[in-house]
């Protein structure tokens, strides 16, 4: 069972989705849950089915004290690198919360201070604390929906299925059709080459 709180303070959990993708944004969510919140099915979003994530998204959004989502686009990922872009997305989500937290818990091991609010990085935090798991679910569901919209513009890459991750199908489409404005040009898009000629 996931713990409700790390600190006992008004606590925001934050997490990102899409860090390892070749295309699309990195998306972060920040969530403040009430102290009495309990949802047995809540876990790291990668461990959940799409239908369960969708159901949990509705529960989280109706129960949370506050939540916010932020997308950082490929242009900024290429400019600032994926780690900094991920932290930027988390900071923006925290900024957009209508309730300011007293403490922040972050999935992973890297973060930069936000408004001098105390924070703790927690490895596999999305499988240990409900507010990080909730952020994981929201980041994943909102990013998936974003990629499904982009699929309508570029259906040849099948982003509605692979969501921009480096599947063999996605890489085969890059070989065949080239890249789109939504691809991350700083990433190794194909194993055999580091960059494209533009």
Image (spheres, grey):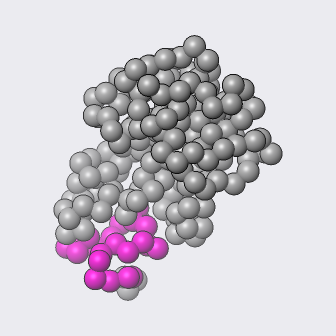
**In the image as oriented, which residue stretches furthest toward the right?**
116
Q: Nearer the viewer, residue 128 or 194?
A: 128
Q: Please, is residue 107 above or below residue 6 in the view?
A: below
- In the rendered structure, the answer to whether residue 73 lies left or right of residue 150 reads right
Q: Is residue 72 visible?
A: yes
- In the rendering, at what x and y percent does residue 171 appear? 24, 68
| Residue 116 position (above or below residue 155) | above
Q: Residue at x 46, y 73 (%)?
A: 186
x and y percentages locating residue 101 in the rendered image:
72, 31
Front one among 39 and 155: 39
Q: Is residue 67 left or right of residue 103?
A: left
Q: Is residue 53 magenta?
A: no
- The residue at the point 73 percent across, 47 percent down is 114
Q: In the image, is residue 176 above or below residue 156?
A: below
Could you tell me which residue is drawn at 33 percent across and 38 percent down?
Answer: 47
Residue furthest bottom in the image:
197
**Is residue 70 shown to the viewer in this render?**
no
Residue 191, image x and y in percent?
29, 77
Residue 177 within the segment the image draws in magenta: yes
Residue at (32% x, 45% y) in the render: 148
Position of the N terminus, as image quadrant, is: top left
Q: Quadrant of residue 14?
A: top right
Which residues are the magenta region?
A: 174-195
Give the main secondary structure, helix, strand or loop, of the magenta stretch. loop
Labels in figure, total: 0
Q: Quadrant of residue 178?
A: bottom left
Residue 32 location (% of width, % of height): 61, 27
């Amino acid at each position: 069972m996931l713990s409700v709180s790390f600190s006992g303070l008004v606590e925001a959990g934050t997490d990102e989705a899409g860090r390892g993708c070749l295309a699309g944004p990195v998306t972060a969510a920040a969530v403040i849950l009430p102290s009495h919140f309990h949802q047995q099915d809540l876990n790291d979003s990668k461990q959940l089915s799409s239908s369960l994530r969708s159901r949990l998204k509705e529960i989280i959004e109706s129960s949370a004290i506050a939540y916010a989502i932020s997308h950082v686009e490929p242009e900024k990922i290429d400019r600032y690198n994926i780690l900094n872009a991920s932290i930027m997305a988390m900071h923006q989500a925290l900024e957009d919360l209508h309730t300011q937290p007293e403490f922040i818990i972050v999935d992973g091991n890297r973060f930069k201070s936000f408004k001098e609010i105390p924070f703790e990085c927690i490895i596999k935090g999305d499988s240990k604390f409900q507010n990080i798991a909730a952020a994981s679910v929201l980041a994943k569901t909102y990013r998936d929906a974003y990629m499904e919209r982009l699929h309508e513009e570029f259906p040849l890459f099948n982003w509605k299925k692979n969501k921009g991750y480096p599947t063999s199908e996605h890489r085969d489409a890059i070989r065949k059709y080239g890249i789109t404005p939504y691809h991350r040009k700083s990433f190794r898009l194909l194993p055999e080459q580091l960059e494209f000629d533009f």
